[in-house]
Image (cartoon, rainbow, N blue to C red):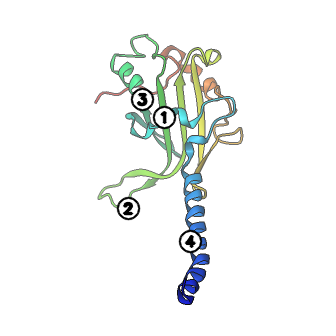
């Protein structure tokens, strides 16, 4: 190797190492921030059990003063809704799943009329029908995951959140008992 090429290689080695390290760190941060599917409620549901929920069909929307939400259902549950469940008195089938995404409501800055639209993501809640696994909570498992905008990550909800979550698969059961006659599901499937 000539003296010039040895010099170039030696001087480029630290630059290549720094570049490789930067790519590795950036990739690790991006992976950590986007790996919501590794989060699990202790003793309860895992985010990974709902992979692909972003593409599920909308069931309905809801809004309170502090949050607006879209309620999505997997194909099993959508088919049940279309067949008349729960109004027909039948329960939802095993494998039915709901995702409820909450945002902070904000006024649109682009709409020509007054319109409230989703702002900051607040949390994502899940419900899954598995009568064997969740026999002591009406056959449904529940989970709530709080979104942290600063870290772009999710963590299981706790008793200090609103509403308080007990960090297990029964965290939503107490609220849902008032709709036991509708197989513990609040959200109706409105006409389209």
Q: Which residue is mark 1?
A: 99
Q: Nearer the viewer, mark 1 or mark 3?
A: 3
Q: Nearer the viewer, mark 2 or mark 4?
A: 4
For the view shown, which residue lies furthest in the top direction? 89
Q: Which residue is mark 4?
A: 19
Residue 182 visible to the viewer: yes
State which tag comes first along the sequence, 2 or 4. Answer: 4
What numbered label is drawn on residue 109? 2
Q: In terms of depth relative to the viewer, which is nearer, 147 or 15?
A: 15
Q: Are marks 2 and 4 in contact (CB under 8 Å)?
A: no
Badge 1 density bin: few <14, some 14–19, many ≥20, Cα 10 Å: many
Badge 2 density bin: few <14, some 14–19, many ≥20, Cα 10 Å: few
State which tag comes first along the sequence, 3 or 2. Answer: 3
Residue 148 visible to the viewer: no
Mark 1 vs mark 3, CA separation in Å:
8 Å
Q: Nearer the viewer, mark 1 or mark 4?
A: 4
Q: Nearer the viewer, mark 3 or mark 2?
A: 3
| Residue at disc 3, secondary structure | loop
- Residue 190, placed above or below residue 94: below
Mark 2 vs mark 4, CA separation in Å:
40 Å
Mark 1 vs mark 4, CA separation in Å:
40 Å
Q: Are marks 1 and 3 in contact (CB under 8 Å)?
A: no
Q: Residue at x 61, y 24 (%)?
A: 173
Q: Which residue is mark 3?
A: 74
Q: Name the quarter where the N terminus is drawn.
A: bottom right
């Amino acid at each position: 190797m000539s003296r010039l090429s040895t010099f170039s290689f030696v001087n480029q080695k630290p630059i290549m190492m720094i570049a490789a390290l930067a790519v590795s760190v950036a990739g690790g941060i991006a992976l950590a921030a986007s790996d919501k599917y590794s989060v699990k409620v202790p003793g309860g549901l895992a985010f990974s059990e709902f992979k692909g929920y972003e593409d599920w069909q909308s069931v309905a929307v809801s809004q309170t003063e502090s949050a607006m939400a879209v309620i999505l259902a997997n194909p099993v549950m959508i088919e049940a809704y279309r067949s008349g469940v729960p109004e027909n008195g039948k329960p939802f089938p095993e494998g039915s799943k709901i995702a409820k995404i909450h945002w902070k409501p904000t006024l649109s800055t682009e709409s020509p009329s007054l319109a409230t639209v989703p702002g900051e993501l607040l949390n994502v809640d899940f419900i899954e029908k598995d009568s064997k696994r969740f026999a002591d909570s009406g056959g449904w498992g529940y989970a709530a995951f709080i979104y942290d905008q600063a870290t772009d990550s999710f963590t299981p909800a706790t008793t200090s959140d609103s509403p308080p979550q007990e960090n297990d698969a029964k965290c939503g059961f107490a609220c849902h008992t008032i709709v036991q006659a509708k197989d513990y599901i609040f959200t109706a499937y409105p006409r389209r």
